[in-house]
Amino acid sequence: MVQHKPRKYKSLSKPRFDLSTAEKTGAYVVGVDIGGSNLRIALADRKGSSLGKWATSTKETASPQVVISLIHKGMHQLLRQTAVQRSSLRAIAVGAPGVTDRDTGVVFATSYLRGWKNVPLAAMLQAELQLPAVVENDVKLAAIGEHWAGAAQGIPNFVFLAIGTGIAAGIFVNGHLVDGRDWIAGEVGYLIVPGTRETPSKAGEPGPLESAIGGEGVRQQWLASCPSDGGATAQDLTATGIFYHALAGNPKAMKILDRSARILAYAVHNISAVLNPSLFVLGGGVGMNGPLIAATERILECYTQPSRPQIVASALGQDAQLMGAIRLALDKAESRKHLQPAHYRS
Amino acid sequence: MVQHKPRKYKSLSKPRFDLSTAEKTGAYVVGVDIGGSNLRIALADRKGSSLGKWATSTKETASPQVVISLIHKGMHQLLRQTAVQRSSLRAIAVGAPGVTDRDTGVVFATSYLRGWKNVPLAAMLQAELQLPAVVENDVKLAAIGEHWAGAAQGIPNFVFLAIGTGIAAGIFVNGHLVDGRDWIAGEVGYLIVPGTRETPSKAGEPGPLESAIGGEGVRQQWLASCPSDGGATAQDLTATGIFYHALAGNPKAMKILDRSARILAYAVHNISAVLNPSLFVLGGGVGMNGPLIAATERILECYTQPSRPQIVASALGQDAQLMGAIRLALDKAESRKHLQPAHYRS
């Protein structure tokens, strides 16, 4: 087994809760975000205030067993750090980067972590940690986080749109998450709009929208366009780097930003025509990019029919998933107590 | 006031309920579908069995007052025909062809009926008929009808997609209708996909998808293409007529059918990527067209990622709205009795 050196978790956004409200003799929950690159854990009290965070890399980690033992390790380290009793833990909620059945706690498939298939993650966690466990897709968790403590507080109809390497949405309708028939509602990386490819996607292949404006898609546009054009020849630029080059006036980058913003505007317009949400919250490294959001907003100004979509950047940033996990763990803990359904309640 | 000659309503689908179960001494409800061309009324018992139907034209009728007096007239005629006591009526539900606030019963806007604006239809009906009244958008009513007694029975996640002159969807998520922030969820006539126009729509103007494959859009394609091509020169063909010409081998019509099916397939694929519904139920004169459904299904066969959308023709046809109105009236009647929310319960 590869040894993992835990590193201190650096929160990007300020903690929203006063740590002094923590009651160390009370009930606590654990929230976990399993990403393709990092595993993050937070320990929180019953009000959702985070007492401590822990993180490690998942880059060399593939198997669910190893991930669970890392969660176990981090959880115990957090308990030690915070002097919280193990017996005070009430529930754990874990976000997985793939198609997840929240009811049974099975992760059907992931693109990252070398492709999990039908992993009964909640049952495995419950057996290993002896703690009520719930599992949810990471983008839906981020939507829960934004709804609870971020940009979409108190908004029953909104779309959290995550654009990083991949593209997916966590959708709230009437205060509840939309799951669909196969738990794959929000797979908007497959949208086909003018400017994306029109051909069908093969299994495992990025969808048309994702290929066009996901992080890798933008980078491919940069690499494919003439390197002599505009003087910017750096080959290792990320999508966000390219968009900031556009802001600085690089013509090649400006063309890519314009094209990306137009495609994103069509995607947002289309989702808006279907759902009429109050708000789009843009998350992910590409989605939160200032120049991209500004350029997309300029295009959407003209698209007022049937209603003009409102877009804002995520308020919680990289913490959105972890906040959603804490919220879901609190719900799980409450449902154990009150025999209420574990489904997230707005 | 223009005199309207009531005409016998001809049901297109067989009644689903046994008339012998009607209890004339019991409780009854009235369901109404206000269309741009016709007004239809049904009287039903508490099980939803229709005891009788009545219809008249709305072509010369614009004002809400005239429509309400027609409803009054039809309702009393049905009561006489069926020997049901006026005092046995418990509720009336009315479908309006426009943006409707189900909670307040206000019709914000209609494209037909010379453009209603902010008509408090439920309150007006309640005052005129002295009966608890509820009002809903007609396409959403059709979705309720299909969910209750049509092609989507027992399916919590499905999309009823109406394609006639206009295009709109009634969307069910987790067994409930999706309304959105402004009651305009499902305005999918505004979708932008490859093959539609990309320019923004002006207020009152048909949306890009509607302009491309709504009844009038298909007819415009026919009129715009070279009349000498293929030998079919009829200028007064409808969209469905054109599609049947395609089936008969007319090359010009085949081209229009292919193009329409591809655009419809992209729209269905996109809505499916957002919502992951179990089923699309196609309604409306164009949507129920056999050649169009078959051609669209052939294209969707290749679009299996993230999941292959399933499409079927409406089971209730022109009766979908009326069945939905009966269901909503029954819900309204029950909520009066049991103090339950009037929102449609699956």
Image: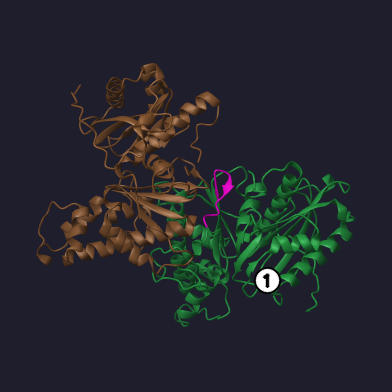
Chain colours: A green, B brown
SS at circle 1: loop
Q: Quadrant of the N terminus of chain B?
A: top left
Residue drawn 45% across the image and 79% down it: A225
Name the outermost residue toward the front.
B20
Please provide percent x and percent y for residue B230. Answer: 12, 66
Front-most of residues A147 and A257: A147
Rendered position, B337 above or below A80: above
Residue A174 among magenta residues: yes
Name the outermost residue toward the bottom.
A228
Please provide percent x and percent y for residue B175. Answer: 51, 45
- Number of numbered markers: 1
Q: Chain of mark 1?
A: A
Q: Amino acid at mark 1?
A: Ser
Residue A185 among magenta residues: no
Please provide percent x and percent y for residue B297. Answer: 35, 63
Tell me the quarter of the picture where residue B132 sits.
Answer: top left
Rendered position, B133 above or below A93: above
- Secondary structure mostly seen in magenta is loop
Q: Which residues are magenta?
A: A172-181
In this rendering, position of residue A81 left or right of residue A313: right
Rendered position, A153 above or below A204: above
Front-most of residues B235 and A246: B235
Q: Which residue is mark 1?
A: A37
Residue drawn 36% across the image and 17% down it: B85
In this rendering, position of residue B193 left or right of residue A277: left
Classed neighbour count for the residue bearing mark 1: other residues with Cα under 10 Å, few (<14), some (14–19), many (≥20): few
Rendered position, B75 above or below A269: above
Front-most of residues B334 and B189: B334
Q: Is residue A276 visible?
A: no
In this rendering, position of residue B106 left or right of residue A90: left
